[in-house]
């Protein structure tokens, strides 16, 4: 424990100053934003403060939960950042940030349409950003979108456009992106955030990293699921300013192409991809784990039964990997794991016995340790597997980078 007060100053953008004062166990965070209020530029004053208040009061400030048994023995454990406490989940943060920055740069005109491809979580964030900043929102998704989410997105005022066929090579994700392009061609004022390659999807997570530092102070290992690569890159960037030795462990689903595996059909949504998102910061990761659906279901249900805190596919996969890290590292290793959302979307899948039985997802507890492979290009993971070799497939001669 520190014997003297500690003050840290970090600049995120020119003019934005964040100070963290830490004295022994007490940590306080104060934001001092000296830029002009981004909400003030186009809305009348009354609407501005009401809408700005909406996002500031609802998003961020999520709790962390210490998780030990049964994921690790007493004294060992990890800290879970419960992003499901945001109204739409983790992606409320980058959605608000991407829209705010696009408006500030003049790329998104007041009242213009926002069109984006999403498996759900960013859609909720964009629906919120549409309300906050006054934009119509069209979300392109696929038939796997959970009915509850589709209904809620409509209730939040978004238009939901569902593609009917996967792309023969790039799967559902590519089919959604092609549809976004077609819709953008019909409306020249429309703007697409493009979460896969927009750097604001990365910097939108600065607040998450800062909150983790304020809550945990020192972090040795960060565990993040990877879909667009946005939150792993953004949180790692912030945490590294406090600990340059930070280890980052990526969590993907089997059948995902991100870390060099061949594309296969996937039932886990949120994490994973059938394309190569440019926001993935390959150089940040020290290892990657691929997790299978039954293993994530076991972890989600075990979290529910023992912690009263749970979530979706990425939460289960991250908890499984974090528990193993906690068991295999010394007790004083501080592990932070990002839990991107809560359980509400998954009542018809992860928490539905009929669904799980029909998909053989409830037969056995998850293994206690992963297999290890060293070459993700020649060895294919079909169950929980770790690989300490990180390969950027976009730099391989035989793969076509997909933007
Ligand atoms: C529920 C959930 N978990 C994890 C992820 C992966 O996060 P990222 O896109 O920041 O890599 C996503 C992305 O859509 C998601 O929706």
Image (cartoon, rainbow, N blue to C red):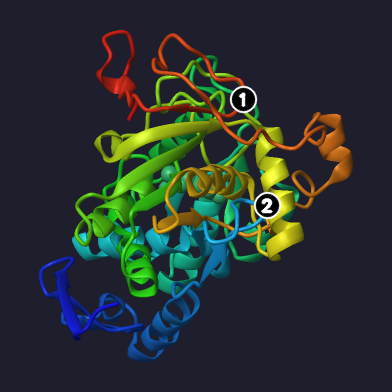
Image mark for residue 383: 1
Q: Name the residue: 25% across, 80% down.
A: 37
Sequence order check, earlier mark of 1 and 2: 2
Q: Name the residue: 33% across, 54% down.
A: 220
Residue 256 location (% of width, % of height)? 51, 26
Q: Quadrant of the N terminus?
A: bottom left
Whether residue 193 is visible here, answered yes or no, is no
* Disc 2 secondary structure class: helix
The answer to whether the residue bearing label 2 lies less than 8 angstroms from the nearest atom of ligand 1 is: no
Residue 369 location (% of width, % of height)? 58, 33
Q: Is residue 272 above or below residue 340?
A: above
Q: Please give the residue where the numbered disc 2 appears in the rendered image.
A: 150
Residue 337 location (% of width, % of height)? 47, 54
Q: Name the residue: 49% across, 15% down.
A: 262
* Residue 374 as seen in the image, left or right of residue 31: right
* Residue 93 as seen in the image, left or right of residue 18: right
Q: Which residue ends up furthest to the left in the rendered image?
A: 14
Count neighbours of disc 1 (C-alpha within 10 A) and say few if under 14, some if 14 to 19, many if 20 or more: some
Q: Is residue 114 above or below residue 361?
A: below
* Residue 62 as seen in the image, left or right of residue 94: right
């Amino acid at each position: 424990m520190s014997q003297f007060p500690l003050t840290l100053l970090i600049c995120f953008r020119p003019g934005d100053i964040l100070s963290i004062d830490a004295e022994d166990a007490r940590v306080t965070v104060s934001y001092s934003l000296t830029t002009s209020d981004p909400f003030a530029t186009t809305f009348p004053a009354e609407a501005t403060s009401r809408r700005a208040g909406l996002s500031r009061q609802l998003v961020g400030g999520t709790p962390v939960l210490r998780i030990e048994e049964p994921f690790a023995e007493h004294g060992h454990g990890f800290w879970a950042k419960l992003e499901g406490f945001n109204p739409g989940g983790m992606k409320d943060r980058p959605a608000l940030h991407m829209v705010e920055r696009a408006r500030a740069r003049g790329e998104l005109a007041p009242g213009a349409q926002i069109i984006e491809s999403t498996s759900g979580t960013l859609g909720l964030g964009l629906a919120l950003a549409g309300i906050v900043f006054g934009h119509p929102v069209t979300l392109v998704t696929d038939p796997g979108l959970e009915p509850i989410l589709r209904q809620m997105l409509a209730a939040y005022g978004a238009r939901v456009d569902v593609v009917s066929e996967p792309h023969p090579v790039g799967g559902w994700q590519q089919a959604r992106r092609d549809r976004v392009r077609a819709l953008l061609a019909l409306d020249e004022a429309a703007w697409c955030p493009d979460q896969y390659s927009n750097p604001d999807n990365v910097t939108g997570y600065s607040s998450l990293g800062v909150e983790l530092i304020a809550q945990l102070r020192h972090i040795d290992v960060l565990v993040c699921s990877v879909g667009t690569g946005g939150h792993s890159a953004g949180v790692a960037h912030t945490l590294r300013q406090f600990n340059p030795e930070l280890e980052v462990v990526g969590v993907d689903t089997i059948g995902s192409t991100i870390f060099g595996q061949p594309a296969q059909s996937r039932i886990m949504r949120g994490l994973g991809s059938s394309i190569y998102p440019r926001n993935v910061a390959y150089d940040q990761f020290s290892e990657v784990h691929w997790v299978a659906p039954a293993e994530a279901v076991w972890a989600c249900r075990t979290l529910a039964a023992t912690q009263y805190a749970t979530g979706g596919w990425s939460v289960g996969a991250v908890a499984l990997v974090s528990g193993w890290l906690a068991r295999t590292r010394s007790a004083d290793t501080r592990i932070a794991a990002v839990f991107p959302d809560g359980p509400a979307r998954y009542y018809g899948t992860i928490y539905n016995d009929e669904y799980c039985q029909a998909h053989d997802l409830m037969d056995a507890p998850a293994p206690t340790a992963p297999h290890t492979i060293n070459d993700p290009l020649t060895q294919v993971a079909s169950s929980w597997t770790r690989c300490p070799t990180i390969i950027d497939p976009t730099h391989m001669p035989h793969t076509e980078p997909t933007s």
